[in-house]
Amino acid sequence: MHARELPRRPDLVQYKKQAKELVRLFRAGDQDFLQFGRLLKLIQQVHPKHKTKSEAEIRGAVFALSDAQLVLAREHGFASWPVFARAVEAARGGELVEVREDADAAFLRAACVPVNGDGHGSGNLEAAEAILKAHPEVAGASIYVAAALGDAEGVRRWLAKDAGVAEAKGGVYRWDALTYLCFSKYLRVLRQDAGRSEGFLAAARALLDAGASADTGWFQANDELMPFWESVIYGAAGVARHSEMTRLLLERGADPNDEETAYHAAEGYDLTVLRVLLESGKLNAESMTTLLVRKADWHDAAGIRMVLEFGGNAHLETRWRVSGLMAAVRRDNELENVALMLGIAPNMGDEAVRASVRGAASLAAMRGRGDVLSLFAERGVLPELAGVERLLEACACGDVPGVRAIAESEPGLIRELLAVGGSVLGRFAANGNVEGIRLLLELGVDAAATDSEGDAYFDIAKGGTGLHAAAWRMRHEAVALLLERGVPVNALDAKGRSALQRAVVACVDSYWSRWRKPDSVEMLLRAGASVAGIDFPSGYAEVDGLLREYGA
């Protein structure tokens, strides 16, 4: 595993407090199940007494303060707490000096995923190749370099000298060879190169045959109490997206049920790796639900259908307290995806299904998804909403008599609506619910009200108006209505962007640019939108013609 580095001025008192906090966390158990799960994995990986135990066995073990201190010490690369404590005191006294990194270490750092800051799937091979060119001897420096390069012959030579190096930790990050291999940028960048890909597979087989664990990996420090566990199956499936490496690790015993594998394997629209994971039968219910939630993030109907066919349950909640169905509504998925998640005849006698449908209906009302609410009604599962959600449901469905009846009988709901009016108006506008917008305005929502929440997923900033949201999502009829109702055309959101800027970028750099039309840009320009700050030319001829006409 990657030994956690000491800060420049470490404090032993703080580490003693942290050890006590680990004991408290262990005793609290599943009260903080996410942090507790990470602690169990850390204990399993670094505590000598627990290395061969399952997480279930570790749960039932005694975890004393001395155990917590040992875990902290070994997490930082020290054999014991006393050795760790002396190193901390020495570092605090300024006794540690920087050592210039040699070429071997520099290569491994350049050849593998970033361990702090940047995403694991980022970066190219330029720096690593430059080091190899300047120092060709690096290629034969260690089994760790050979693994990172997918050099099967090199790996075999090192194993022939000493089979124990298959499990030994070393190199710049103190990882084992299989971890360097699975988190190598070469594995990701060159996965389409059949020859290099086979080299990586042969190297991995040699390591596994020699005793390397398919469940190895490293811990990444974060700003939380417990670090993230980055398993080699995550490196293969979620970072490199290498289907055959993923298959090999699964066949050799890798457990894909961590925080990262399902979450990242669901990214994108290539379902090859996803199918390998599903066909293994090793994904638990939590991981299956994570796949559905993430496929909703990607609006991927084919991916959703595949996970459901393999037994995924769109009504179970993940650790984010959201089901696949709720995620599909929260991310404004097409009705087809919502219908897939809902199922033809959901069992409303199941408490999890009821909670999922209830949560999705609430989101649909808040986001102006009248089509979703109608689908639920058609399938006989629409729950009875209460309070302001009931009023928003009527607005979302364009139920004019219903809206007026609720407003008359429960005037207090109007005050509740107005308190969140800007945010609700933004969601209705983003989904193009023009009739719903008319009803919101009839109830007194200010057409120029600003969004106090924003929607980071859709890059909708706080402080924007419904006009910003409609322009960005290319809801042309909503743009026309809001302009008609006098929304300031040059208002800026919290990121300093105008509705016109959003409309132009939507046409050339958005997930929905394939549906682009210049209509909103033209309406905004005619309404007096300033061309200041607009990137020109945009690359979309029809829009560029309009911008030029108005002075760009």
Image (tube, helix red, strand yellow):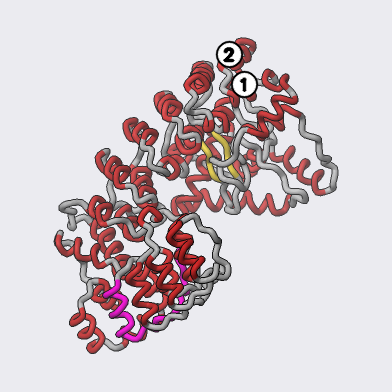
The mark total stands at 2
Assign a secondary structure to mark 1. helix
Residue 515 picture quarter: bottom left
- Callout 2, which amino acid? Glu
The image shows residue 83 at horizontal and vertical percentages of 74, 37
Q: Is residue 352 visible?
A: no
Is the residue marked by circle 1 packed among few (<14), some (14-19), or many (20+) residues within 10 Å? many
The N terminus sits in image quarter: top right
Identify the residue at image location x=39%, y=52%: 297
Identify the residue at image location x=47%, y=70%: 499
Q: Is residue 318 above or below residue 463?
A: above
**Mark toward the start of the polypeptide (1 vs 2):** 1
What residue did someone put label 1 on?
Answer: 146
Q: Is residue 16 above or below residue 114?
A: below
The image shows residue 137 at horizontal and vertical percentages of 73, 19
The image shows residue 364 at horizontal and vertical percentages of 29, 66
What stretch of residues is rendered in magenta? 434-456
Marks 1 and 2 sit apart, C-alpha to C-alpha, by 8 Å
Query: Residue most toward the top?
Result: 160
What residue did someone put label 2 on?
Answer: 153
Assign a secondary structure to mark 2. helix
Is the residue marked by circle 2 packed among few (<14), some (14-19), or many (20+) residues within 10 Å? some
- Callout 1, which amino acid? Ala
Q: Is residue 47 above or below residue 400?
A: above
Of 460 and 246, nearer the camera is 460
